[in-house]
Amino acid sequence: MAAGVPARLMLNGIAKRFPGVLANDNVSFSVAPGKIHALLGENGAGKSTLVKMIYGVMPPDAGSMSWNGAQVTVASPRAARKLGIGMVFQHFSLFEALSVLENIALGLDTRISQRDLEVEIRKVLDSYGLKLDPFRIVATLSVGERQRIEIVRALLLDPQLLIMDEPTSVLTPQEVEQLFETLRKLAAGGCSILYISHKLHEIVALCEAATILRAGKVVAECDPRRETSKSMAELMIGTKLMSITKAPGRTLGAPKLAVQDLSLPRRGDFGVALQDISFRVRAGEIFGIAGVAGNGQNELLEALSGEILSPMAGTIMLDAAALGQLGPEARRKAGLCAVPEERNGHAAVGEFSLADNAILTARGRLGLVRRGFINAAKARRYTEDIIKTFGVKAQGSGTLGGSLSGGNLQKFIMGREILQKPGVLVLSQPTWGVDAGAAAAIHQEIVDLAAAGSAVVVISQDLDELLSLCDTMVVINLGRLSRELTVGAVSIEDIGLLMGGVHGDPAATVHMTEVLHATAV
Amino acid sequence: MSIDFLISALVTIIGVSTPILLAATGELVVEKSGVLNLGVEGMMLIGAIAGFAVTNATFNPWAGLICAAAAGVLAASMFGVLVLTLGSNQVATGLALSIFGIGLSSLIGQAYEGTMNPPFGSIFPYELAHHPYGKVLFGHSPLVYFAFVMVFATSWFLNRTRAGLVLRAVGENDLSAHSIGYSVVGVRFAAIAFGGALAGLAGAYFSMVITPIWAQQLTAGRGWIALALVVFAGWRASRLIFGAYLFGFLMTLELYAKASGYHVMPSQFWASMPYLMAVVVLAVISARDRGGSYAPACLGRPFVPNG
Amino acid sequence: MRLRFEKRVAPSQFMQVATPVASVLLTMVIGAILFEALGYDGPRAVKEIFLTPIIESYKWQDVATRAAPLILIGLGLSVGNRAKVWNIGAEGQYIIGALSGAGVAYGTQSAQGLWIIPLMILAGIVGGMAWAAIPALLKVRFQVNEILSSLMLTYVALQVLSYLITGPWKDPNGHNFPQTAPFTDAQLMPHTLFGTFIPPGLVVAFGLALVFWLVIAKTTFGYQIRVVGAAPQAARYGGFDAAQTVFLAMLIGGGTAGLAGIIEASSQSGQINLGFPSGYGFTAIIVSFLGRLHPVGVVIAGLLMAVSYVGGQVAQSAVHVPNATAGIFQATMLFLLLASDKLVRYRLRLVRAPAKPITAGASA
């Protein structure tokens, strides 16, 4: 930082407490003007809470903030915006049924006519080389485009500090590169960027300074350009990283799961049609399906789990059994278990006890019901088994699902399915929003399950996860699968291109994705 | 069928449709903000008795109307506090409001049973209001014109003003609106109060214009038809008029069938027509609305801000 | 210092029971004050409404008679409510059930035998189910809001009633009054059983409560109802057919309402006239909520509502409060219950305002 120039933003001793947890504990750091500053930490470290306080969404319980050298209280998001702080949230504040223009208008504090606003928006889009049609209805836009709305909203403020909260979890590698370009341009113009993420290689590529949070406290400050992903990861987690142990030289068995020409029409106005999906997974193999959210992953999972039936029985085969026309319970009995992406309300019911949640999927395969009556004792024993074997932090089988932390609930759900010893297990985003410790445990369980002879399918947006777990991979894009890729023999760039759907021109890829999205709707 | 018959039929239809139109307009705004208020029937009855009682006491129908609207706002506010501040179940609370309104209006109305007020008719000059043809346009109580104005005003408000945009946004995605910094509770409460005012006026139409004699439950389920009307109109203000007049026409059929002694179908058939039609209409509209893309996305869901 | 709601770790069992009780007590207090303000003897009115029917044994039969249909319908509605199905048309299903049974009676006027009453009861149940099947089908096939459709059908049911008793089923010896012919001896159930104050409907209600409790707590079907109501997507994932569950849940509501209707017609009124619809279908909605959707709760709430009905009449003659009071009390109890519901999931806390950092002019 140049001598005499005050920090753009300085936090001193910020603290925030919620019932049962100290989210931020004596956090102090400063962001220099025009610098891209990373805020690093795993899920649950307190990053989001901290940033919400900077943006005025909630007040800190202790500590002070200063802006360009003067102490300041940010009482509300409006006050933050007045100061010149813009924020792009991880979860967008968009209104699907309204147009881009209306959405941006809603995010502004000043009243401005629609015509003038359109002019302003086009000015911003031009100066940063972004593409967006102000009159499109948001529901028809891809995730990358939606993020662009949020970015334009923030840029219209002419901000001095732009906060980006986990911006790349929903972007293709090419879209990420484009975002970085925009951010670098902003920083060159004097705007500071506070970049929150847990994606280490991105931070190494983009940021000039980093503050690392762990369990609510600042544990390190560093320059990412001089660190490695591994060293920062260890600072983030606090322990030496254990790599997953995979038995070397495993042999894969005969094909266990065969999906042939699975095609499904689009569900509703905003769904994705599946087209000619075919793949085979052998016993002991971990098969990955990569892709950015919104390309048919949920539809594929539901087609595999049985929530959506296939037009023909033979479309989905487990060993010799044709499952296509069977519902979820029949598929479980045949040995196919699945875990959907959404923990709350889909894979598990928050209002139910863990025992009741166990009954949800295990009752048929493990005989927890008999002649229409529930065997409560058996369900309880199974639940306790899961809790013990998978290290779920819960008080007992009567604990409510909703009272468990994300990571714990996910461990329970994984345990519930794995202990049913399925022949095939299909997982969607198995470690989404889960802290690194639980994620590592879940990864090991997946590897162990495959080693015991099951076929595992992992659908995930997290390329790192897929590359560390899978033997074979495909990419799903707009409801179609790419060719099979052997992990270790393909580069991230290639995968990124497949995620974008076009083989070849990277710049065209991003544009093409959006066009394909728009016409597909 | 003579011209006179047509004219008087038209006048009747307009009269019968007005309260439904008023109540539905109010409820449309409420639902656009994401709240489902089933208490329309109760609010109408509360407005009805308030309007009647005040007119009876002051001999001033305008005072009656204002108090009817105010009573509707009060009743709606009870609902608003329960649903917005305390997050109570919207369906149950709305029902409770209806049951409460029915009971309260009966209780207060007991003292007025059989009493008669002068009807609050047209304020236009006598010749115009009673002109054989002109009475279609000029022979109505001010509430009729008010209802029309309100529909257009509401449509303009929702679609062309910023406040209306904010209200629609709150109904589409309350969490997003909250993140941006809008007061979801504030917007919804205002919408609920507005709905209460219009429902109160709709009720007053029954007790002050149609038959200014107090009788128990004189709204006879029109509040529920107003709710169906909002669905029928696809939550678009411009379609309300069409639907209200359709129901008005059906309800008038019943009156005319009874009066003319037309015996091919029993009178009960005509009496049930509006309700059966409502069911049919609901089925048709809902069947076409695959994926629920007409209704505001947050309709009926409580607002739970996290953080 | 401000009041703030803090989410509890798990819903409070204590509050689940305490809130309905507190709502009732508070309603009594409010009622007393309200009546005083209107010029009546407030405390006496409340005593007559709530206490007298419980204490005076000559009122027990009245209470029991009114409680039976409330509990029956409430049980059916509570199953539906658990599946997040809102059957507001129970009153219509009650009427159609009674009419269906009356139809059997109309056709068996000169017949004899023990099979007549069971047939009437069966007809009542089927009639109620059929009337509920209409909104159920509309919901499952076309996603029509069952609140509106079931309610509209209630008004239609009233018209059907009016038509039948003034037309085809009119009592030939009834001096042109709108009513059916009185049921014959073979078609009547006794007012009360074996000389006690207990009507047959109440026995059926208690029995059904036990059955429902067992089914909801211990069977797969009960689990199915609970999970469809709690998380429909999870229900599908678990292999349950949400549409079928919703359909069955509505039919159960209709069936119990129809059952209540025919029992009431056969054991109490002995015929059907314009006064037959007594609003039980609507009050049962309150019973279902007040009873927290639990069979035991529904029984208690049903008895309580019955007490308030009977008490309302007692108070009318004793203290001259108008008859409509019962409805207001019931609605107030529901309001208070709904208002206090938040305390089950949230705790009320007095919090100190957070320490504000020193503000010394913001630069913009």
Image (tube, coloured by chain):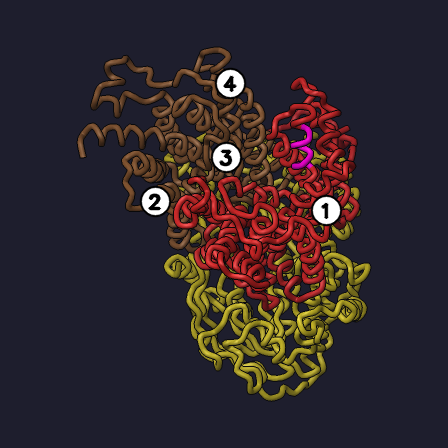
Mark 3 to mark 1 CA distance (whole Å): 40 Å
Badge 3: few (under 14), some or many (20 or more) residues near its Cα, within 10 Å? many
Say which chain tag 1 marks: C
Colour-to-chain, brown: B
Mark 2 or 1: in front is 1
Chain part drawn in magenta:
C308-315
The lab-note entry on whether marks 2 and 1 share a chain reads: no
Mark 2 to mark 1 CA distance (whole Å): 42 Å
Label 3 sits on what residue type? Val
Mark 4 to mark 1 CA distance (whole Å): 44 Å
- Disc on res. B40: 3
Colour-to-chain, yellow: A
Q: Quick check: can you spot residue A476? A: yes
Which residue lies under the disc numbered 2? B266
Looking at the rendered image, the quarter that the C terminus of chain C falls into is top right
Residue A288 coordinates in the image, percent (x, y): 58, 73
The lab-note entry on whether marks 3 and 4 share a chain reads: yes
Say which chain tag 2 marks: B
Which residue lies under the disc numbered 1? C197
